[in-house]
Image (cartoon, grey):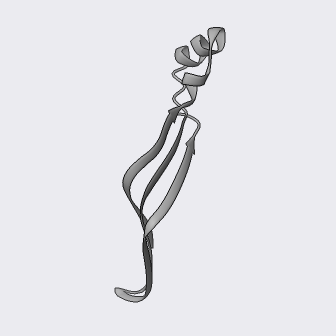
């Protein structure tokens, strides 16, 4: 199992904010909500066999990046 616990946002950027003029109007009319996010937190990997943990690894200094291109359906 892989988990990431977010502690702090580094970048929170909506893609529509970089558009101007007719492209921005078109993006807003189609409700485009793409975004780029970067955040820090704790990363943990756990290997289970049944209910027993076989191995695990954790760090508090991890960076996660996410690029999201539109609405979830």
Quadrant in which the N terminus is drawn: bottom left
| Residue drawn at point x = 54 percent, y = 14 percent | 29
Q: Is residue 73 visible?
A: no
Q: Position of residue 65 (x, y in %)?
A: 54, 51
| Residue drawn at point x = 51 percent, y = 56 percent | 64
The count of marks equals 0
Q: Nearer the viewer, residue 9 or 72?
A: 9
Q: Is residue 73 above or below residue 44?
A: above
Q: Is residue 11 visible?
A: yes
Q: Is residue 20 above or below residue 65?
A: above
Q: Nearer the viewer, residue 20 or 73?
A: 20
Q: Is residue 38 above or below residue 34?
A: below
Q: Nearer the viewer, residue 53 or 36?
A: 36
Q: Position of residue 30 (x, y in %)?
A: 56, 19
Q: Is residue 12 left or right of residue 19?
A: left
| Residue drawn at point x = 61 percent, y = 13 percent | 26
| Residue drawn at point x = 54 percent, y = 23 percent | 17
Examine the image and state in which quarter residue 61 appears. Answer: bottom left
Q: Position of residue 58 (x, y in %)?
A: 42, 76
Q: Position of residue 44 (x, y in %)?
A: 43, 72
């Amino acid at each position: 199992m892989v988990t990431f616990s977010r502690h702090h946002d580094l970048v929170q950027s909506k893609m529509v904010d970089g558009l101007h003029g007719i492209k921005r109007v078109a993006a807003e009319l189609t409700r485009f909500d793409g975004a780029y996010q970067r955040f820090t937190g704790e990363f943990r990997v756990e290997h289970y066999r049944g209910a027993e943990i076989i191995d695990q690894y954790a760090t508090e200094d991890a960076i996660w990046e996410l690029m999201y291109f539109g609405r979830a359906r």
